Image: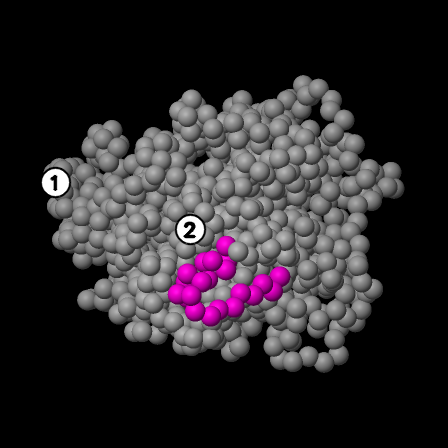
Amino acid sequence: MKASNTLWKERLAGKMPEDLAREIDIFDTEVALRKQGKMDERLFAETRLRRGVYGQRYDNGQRHNGQAVQQMPYPSGELTKGPNTMWDAPGMQRIKIPGGGLNADQLETMADLAEEYSDNIAHVTTRQDFQLHYVHIEDTPSLMRRLAAANITTREACGNSVRNVTACPYSGVCQDEVFDVTPYSRALAKFLLGHPDCQNFGRKFKPAFSGCSQHACGLTSLHDVGFIAKTRSENGTEKRGFEMVVGGGLGAVPYMAKLFDSFVPAEEILPLTQAIARVFARLGEKRNRNRARIKFLIQDLGIEKFKELVLEERKTLPADPRWTEYVKDAAQFVESALRPAGEWPSSASEAFKRWLKSNTRPQKQPGYVTVTVTLPLGDITSSQLRSLADIVRRFTRETIRTTVEQNFVIRWVSKSDLPELYKALQAVGLGDPGAGTIVDVVSCPGTDTCKLGISSSRGLAAELRKRLAEKSFQADEAVENLHIKVSGCFNSCGQHHVADLGFYGVSRKVGGYAVPHFQVVLGGEWEHNAGSYGLPVAAIPSKNIPQVVTRLTDRYVANRTKNETFKDFVKRTGKVEIKSLLDDLARPPAGDRSYFSDWGDPREYGLEDIGVGECAGEVVSSVEFDLAAAEREVFEAQLAFENGQIDQAGKTAYHSMLHAAKALVKISNQNISDDPDRIVSEFRTLYYDTQKFFDPFAGGKFANYLFDAHQKSNGAYTSDSSRYLIDEAQLFIDAAHSCYNRLGTSASA
Amino acid sequence: MELQHVNVKLLVKNSEEVDLEPLIPVFHSWIQGQVFEELLLDVADYRHVPAGPGVVLIGHQGNYSVDNTDSRLGVRYNRKAALDGSNQDRLKQAARAALTACQRLEAEPGLKGKLRFNGQELEVFVNDRLLAPNREVTLEALKADFQGFSRKLFGGGEYSLSYSGGDPRGLFAVSVKTSKSHSVADLLNNLAS
């Protein structure tokens, strides 16, 4: 699309690392081959995904405009860049930033690319990456070359590969860390990039590093492999290593990572990860992508068996000098300051004080602080990126990192420079206070640009941010420190499971119309590297979510005991009472049509953009009552689980799935019995074999939850299996709602 | 020097009175009606970003936005697809697109007449650093094209072209000003004549 595309290759020759340049040349050729129809669309899709070139909403060439599905007559006609993905449709470019670490030149490159190829916005993700949206496929080779010239790669940013290796952005400066994990995370990222043992996964693989156990910053519990810094004494010498956890992950059903080893010496983390990659590639699921993450393999094998296989594999690996050659230097790795250490400012305005309180954190090095630059919804303009580059050059040795809370952290700021730094940030709209507080709402892209989005996570996040910022000055301190995270669907890119107040998008039918909703997820823990996952409490119309936040936070302030965390408050109060507190918000007020559109999107809401058409005008049916009953049951399962009635919880969750399945079966067969075999069999025939139950992107995943649960229904439930089943039951019921929505008028029962 | 990816921004009057939220349904209705010859695709809402791109109507050939970059609110057209023709043709195309969008916005009932072109100032950018780096040399190479375009735009009337240079990392940009206020319709007529 850009007229200068052909010139960039020439201009940047010799300025890119050779391997990256060659890699991009190959991709450039593949773009040309696909355009000429000489490369299969599936193969091209995988090759572009492995370079971070992702699809975006409406790229199937159609868009629901609020009244009807509209065809998008792209100039390249029927040419595709993947199955059902039009060539000309704008896409998303994901850019890997290992550990979130950047320098000023790289910030400037990002600014230029956002301006020239995207819409003047760079977006920081919940895994420290950047994303540019609305990018044309033919611009991607030039974009990659310009990144490569700045020593950044997009390789393996998407696809079934090792994704960005994330790390605590405070590594090296945190007062509570064991040691700086930066060089280890970089070594692993470099080692795994393009590694032959990582090219045959059934799904993605996400590593993370943390310098401590107690804070959230590394989020190791929700990663495929997590490393937490540890030391131990050996012959009087302090030895560096890592507690290693495996098999964590969010997604539809979140899994907490399991302990692989409480101490892996630093020299062993690369080979051990390589061995894990081999086992995952060899034994991991390949056909059913919904069970292809390593967490499922570990669940199926059991952690002990998995560990045994990995350690066996480790013994077979041919020695590689890269495993250890960085280790000696790693121990010496240290960043340094540009400016002399200083003292806190002696006087400050109220606004400056607020910012100091929320956006600065003392480093372990006396006289220095880190400064968090809050980005609303993770967005920053090109002009702001350039200003930020100037700021980090002026005050630091270009020490800046992205965070999983979609912000930047500037490291090594002298305390004496804080007034000037604040002034410089404020001048370019980057001086907002509230970092890491309730105002700092995290959100995935949702229906704005994501093909899988069900509700407008960014629209909701922007609304919450606006409202909370307005009253943040009066907020109780306990409320101020809560975390809100929003995902547009069950896939958890917004990390809603680990928030105090989490929300994920679902749809419900009300009065015959599809209404955007969010499931309210409470009880998650952000600290302790994502210490525990929340559970859904109720589905609430999108437009009522701000009231949900107000009610829950007001109740927390009024009823909490001294030093009680929100998670503990939720547990003590109990889900029954919390649910009843929200009951009147669960239905839109009669006649208020504003509920039929989502935040920031005035189109009448529908699911057409993610699937097949629905027909508004459906009358309220018994199906909806039955689905509501199934929801009540899954809620009861949660309560049983919380009360320690593990087996009961599992049974009730399973029964709620049967109830939802039966609701759908009844549309065709009013006389369906209560026999579970009969229900599952008819459900399979009517909804699975016909694919009517299939989610547009997840396929038969949710139906398989039922089949698995049914198959295992005679066994006993463990704490883990019961917990997973509750989540699966909720997702199955959500999918039943979506299926019913899609069926439209034909589903009247 | 080949000029491509031209952006034209028409600054609006009383920018502090302009609320961007009503633009969102307006832009959605433009997609619904496909009101331009260009293919219109989506709406991106960046109101939460200070001095940012505001609300953007994403198109295939070009984007339309009510943009607040540098805290200067204006109706902006950002040509994305390459165009044949001369540099002046490309300048005129971008100006026509921006003016047409502005004319529609001025007439949109949902905006209650609050969005008005200030009649005297527009900014022209080239969104391609390799073709048009932000340097004096670019101005020298393109000056005649800008002058020809400006004469045409203002019907042969007086105008001034200014290039501030500014941050060399930014886009090449010139500001075109006139002391006489012009309506959008007049400017469109001038370009069509």
Is residue A92 toward the left or the right of residue A359 in the image? left
| A22, A465: nearer the viewer | A22
Please state the horizontal and vertical placement of residue A60, each as a whole percent of the image.
33, 39
Amino acid at pointer 2: Asp
Q: Position of residue A131 (x, y in %)?
A: 52, 47
**Residue behind mark 1:** A670
Can I make out residue A348 in this image? Answer: yes
Q: Quadrant of residue B189?
A: bottom left
| Residue pictured at 39% horizontal, 53% vertical | B93
According to the image, label 2 marks what residue?
B89
Residue A441 percent across, percent down from the top left: 49, 61
Is A664 placed left or right of A722 in the picture?
Answer: left
Residue A193, image x and y in percent? 62, 32
Name the residue located 53 percent from the left edge and 56 percent from the top edge: B144
Residue A528 appears left or right of A181:
left
Q: Which residues are magenta?
A: B145-165
Q: Is residue B8 magenta?
A: no
Chain of the residue under label 2: B
Q: Residue at x 48, y 30 (%)?
A: A31
**Chain letter for the residue marked with disc 1 in the picture:** A
Q: Secondary structure at mark 2?
A: helix
Of residues A415 and B134, which is closer to you in this image? B134
Mark nearest the camera among 2 and 1 is 2
Name the foreground residue: B176 vs A28. Answer: B176
Q: CA distance from mark 2 to mark 1?
A: 68 Å
Looking at the rendered structure, the secondary structure element under dot 1 is loop
